[in-house]
Image: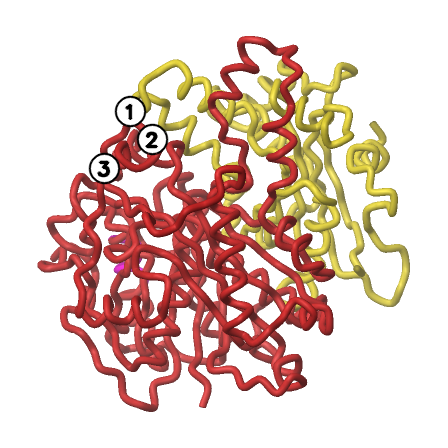
Chain colours: A yellow, B red
Amino acid sequence: MALRLTASSFTLPRADLRWDDDFLRAERARLGLGRRTDRMTAAVLSALDRLEGRPDDAPLLFGSMLGVQSRITALQNDLIDFPEDQIGPVSFSCSVHNAVPGAAAIQFGMKVPIFSLAGFDCLPDRVLSLADAVLSAGDTEQALVILTEERSAFADRAMRLHGLEPMEFAAVFLLERAKDGGETFCTPPERDYFHWIRSVSGF
Amino acid sequence: MIHRTPFDPVVTGFAHLSCAGSTDAEALTLFHGKRPPETPRPACNLIDSAISDPVFYLDSFKNPPDEPRTLAMIRAVVARALDDAGLTTDMLRDFVTGCVVGTTIAHQFTDTAYYARLRDNPDTDENAPVDRFLNSNPAEAIAREYGLTGPIHTVSNACSSGADAVSIAALCLLSGQCERMIVVGADELHRTPVAGFHVLGVTSPFPCRPFDSARAGLNLGEGAGVVILETPECAQKRNWKPEFSLRGFGMSCDASHITAPDVTGGGMKRAFRDAMTRAGLALGDIAFINAHGTGTVLNDQCEAAAFAGLAEENGLTAPPFFSTKRFTGHTLGAAGTLEFIFTMLMLRDGFVPSSPGCKTPDPALACTPLAEQLNLPPETRFAASSSLAFGGTDTVLIAERLG
């Protein structure tokens, strides 16, 4: 890979490795988001809004192992508690994997290709690899990568079984194709995903 | 800035499984009207769901009880597509081969009974369902099964996932990351989307009628489509003569609403223009469009507006367009791949069906779908397939029949 990092932005957790809900509430108000905007979407939009030099024409590459947990959990709770024809329509439509980058595109008027990736084996490698492919195709100078995870009872269990200490984060990277050598941006060989996020964000 | 691609990835094989059939011959007899499309049946009689909306369920496909249904369909259809491409497992290691899977269900943990047990007892030591889930990501499972060393991606862009998988595979080939990609679109019928689309009020109590004035919504379905894409050089080195190429692809986003498409067709037009630029083609070169055509009012308005708008820009009439959803139902993550395959089958066959289920085109649409079946001139080479999705995604693929 030959990627160069030009800017980054993060919404990081408190010491208990969860996002600060007071902060997210304030960001919803600041960004004019609906009061019911879910936590992951609010965290990602906050990070994107704070990204220096955020372009509105760069493809969006979104990577999350487990997706929008607050919406997925709400949907599952609806399925447990109510007849199927009475589940919340928003719980369903906003639980789809590409709902977060879709919301980002709406918020910032980004009429761009969106790639929403899932998976467990080296997800950040995979997303950066696709960013490299997108940039190599030569149709765009920059790509925006979003990596994010949200905690829930299920997500905590899945993360632990996957060897990760459960943690919430939203990370946004603005990438270009590296030219003429120089320092390139990639994940470390040991591939400890969350450790890498801590390292690049200074958490 | 989009450019003409330096080469066109070639399609060296494909396979499909849906209520349109599991062989090319079965699908073509349906397209020719030599057998009637299936009548969708109530979901509550077929899957673990209380919803009675009619759906297209694959009775013929039996998955092993210990394997997720979508993954089982993917494994079966990948094996057939590799065979169609003349590839053995050993040959997959001769060139760098990757895999991209488009799906909306298979990457999510949807075991509601387990969620209930976890909610009742957060300290439960029952981990087996989660462990199984972590090991059943479809792209990763295919990579393990075939020992693939190229790019591995699971894309979940809602209903355009299957088409976006094709675009992602093309980007991986064009960037030089690999020489061959196994491209999959797949989804099973599952109670979550069955209930979700029902409460959104977009499901039809009748067989769907895309573009018809009496349409009442969509029918969900299930299936899998697999396309083997290679660089021309890779196919040439093994003396394989491909019949089709992916001539162009374009992706955009409406950036207007999370579930409703832009009814002016703005995003779809951008995706179409990008696909045509990559293909080095003009709208007049496109013989027909296999539209997304779900049978919802907003989908139909969006696509008709896009096709009419593009035609106006080019001083033409809109290319003939139709939807195959009446044959398969809306197969969600599978739809984009299946419909790209159907587009290639029609180019090969030289025949396009009139839009099934559409008897009286909606007069409010900006242009009307194909009213009668169409025999294509022998020199016909190019056709397009379009997809829309939640999140505002629009994707267009252009297939070329090679000489």
* Relative to B20, A111 lies left or right: right
Calculate the distance from the C-alpha at mark 1 to the C-alpha at mark 3. Answer: 14 Å
Q: Of helix, strand and loop, which one carries label 3?
A: strand
Chain of the residue displaying label 2:
B
Segment tinted magenta in the rendering: B301-306
Q: Is residue B302 magenta?
A: yes
Q: From the image, which quarter does the C terminus of chain A lie in?
A: top right
Callout 2 crowding tier (Cα within 10 Å): few <14, some 14–19, many ≥20: many
Residue at (68%, 49%) from the top-left corner? Answer: A127
Position of B165 relative to A21 (above/below): below
Q: Share a chain, discs 2 and 1?
A: no
The quarter of the picture where residue B45 lies is top left
Chain of the residue displaying label 1:
A
Q: According to the image, label 1 marks what residue?
A: A85
Residue at (22%, 42%) from the top-left corner? Answer: B41
Position of B11 relative to B261 (above/below): below
Q: Can residue B24 be seen by looking at this rendering?
A: yes
Q: Of helix, strand and loop, which one carries label 2?
A: helix
Chain of the residue displaying label 3:
B
Q: According to the image, label 2 marks what residue?
A: B195
Q: According to the image, label 3 marks what residue?
A: B42
* Relative to B326, B313 lies left or right: right
Q: Position of residue B301 (x, y in %)?
A: 25, 53
The one nearer the camera, B219 or B278, is: B219
Q: Of helix, strand and loop, which one carries label 1?
A: helix
Given the image, on which type of amino acid does mark 3 rest? Answer: Pro
